Amino acid sequence: MNEHAFYNILVVAWIILAAIILLVLFFIPAPYGRHIRRGWGPLIPDWLGWVLMESPSAVGMAVLFALGSAPRTVTAWVFLALWEAHYLHRAFVYPFLKRGKDRQMPASVAAMGLFFNLVNVYLNGRYLFTLSGGYPAAWLLDPRFIIGAAVFAIGYTINRWADMVLRGLRRPGETGYRIPQGGLYEWVSCPNYLGEIVEWCGWALMTWSAGGLVFAAWTAANLTPRARDHHSWYRAEFPDYPLQRKALFPGVW
Ligand code: NDP
């Protein structure tokens, strides 16, 4: 089997798995953060889990770029820069900024996250920098790129802002929870997840690739059930939790 055939089979298998995971996560919340519980094996520091899970995406994309056989056009550089703008922060900055980073997470969660990120970086980086044959510079003027990049930027900004608001809810050393307020938090419980989903939908559009699409689907599969769980948790924990606030999609759900 050549790599193109392998890639296509992996895309189909990966999207089917995303649908299964979406269903599973509606019944079994991923056991980290406020939903951590016993029975998921040995624990490691939360910050270490995040570095282990997310660094393959940052490093893997750079390696696939370096090894790629397609022409290294300005478009390829732009894709690399946008991906790394997210993942260098997520893997090597975010884990150390978190308040409560000394909490723990199951090593099994970190292992699953690592596997998820390895497959996704392969599906994206290998396609963009090799299997696609390359994106010409003119792709930067294509409406799919322009609209996708704008959507990506909006999602990225929402995600970073929303994570920053959550950080501000704790003083250094604190581990408790407060009700987040302001901006999109008036509308939904998890604007960080909303931003992340929007961001990768933008990525799928601007790369116009099956790898991008399947990654956006996986992000939604991971974060939609978790948004519902966070929302229910807030309502159970805080009797004064704002009634009009939805879980993930403003005014809808
Ligand atoms: P959470 O919203 O659960 O937590 C983010 C951080 O904020 C944690 O440190 C958490 O502490 C803290 N926090 C959350 N709510 C409160 C509150 N009410 N009061 C005080 N502190 C709070 O996000 P995740 O940890 O699930 O995800 C982190 C980032 O990773 C997000 O940007 C998310 O979009 C992204 N992500 C992306 C995925 C993908 O598939 N692409 C999958 C999972 C996450 P604590 O940990 O102690 O609960």
Image (cartoon, rainbow, N blue to C red):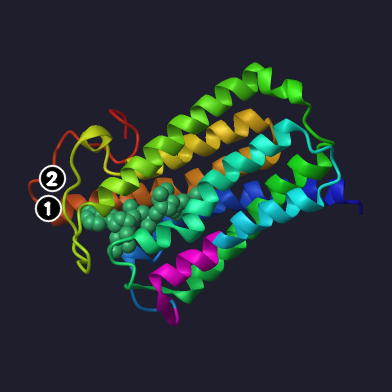
- Residue 242 located left or right of residue 95: left
- Residue 79 located left or right of residue 192: right
Number of the label disc, if any, that sits on residue 241: 2
Could you say where residue 246 lies in the image, as x and y percent from the top left? 26, 37
Q: Can residue 22 be seen in the rendering of this structure?
A: no
Name the secondary structure under disc 1: loop
Three-letter residue code for mark 2: Tyr
Q: Quadrant of the N terminus?
A: bottom right
Residue 114, image quadrant: bottom right
Q: Is residue 52 magenta?
A: yes
Q: Give the crowd class for mark 2: few <14, some 14-19, many >=20 residues within 10 Å.
A: some
Location of residue 32 with respect to 197 vertically, above or below: below
Q: Is mark 2 within 8 Å of ligand 1?
A: no
Name the secondary structure under disc 2: loop
Could you say where residue 149 lies in the image, as x and y percent from the top left? 56, 28
State the residue lying farthest toward the right: 1
Magenta segment's dominant SS is helix
User: Mark 1 highlights which residue?
Assistant: 238
Three-letter residue code for mark 1: Phe
Q: Quadrant of the C terminus?
A: top left
Q: Is residue 141 magenta?
A: no
- Residue 119 located left or right of residue 38: right
Q: Nearer the viewer, residue 119 or 231?
A: 119
Residue at 39 percent of width and 42 percent of height = 159
Residue at 53 percent of width and 64 percent of height = 53
Residue at 48 percent of width and 54 percent of height = 90
State the residue lying farthest toward the bottom: 42
Q: CA distance from mark 2 to mark 1?
A: 5 Å
Contact check, label 2 and label 1, Cβ < 8 Å: yes
* Stretch in magenta: 41-54
State the residue lying farthest toward the left: 240
Could you say where residue 129 lies in the image, as x and y percent from the top left? 77, 43
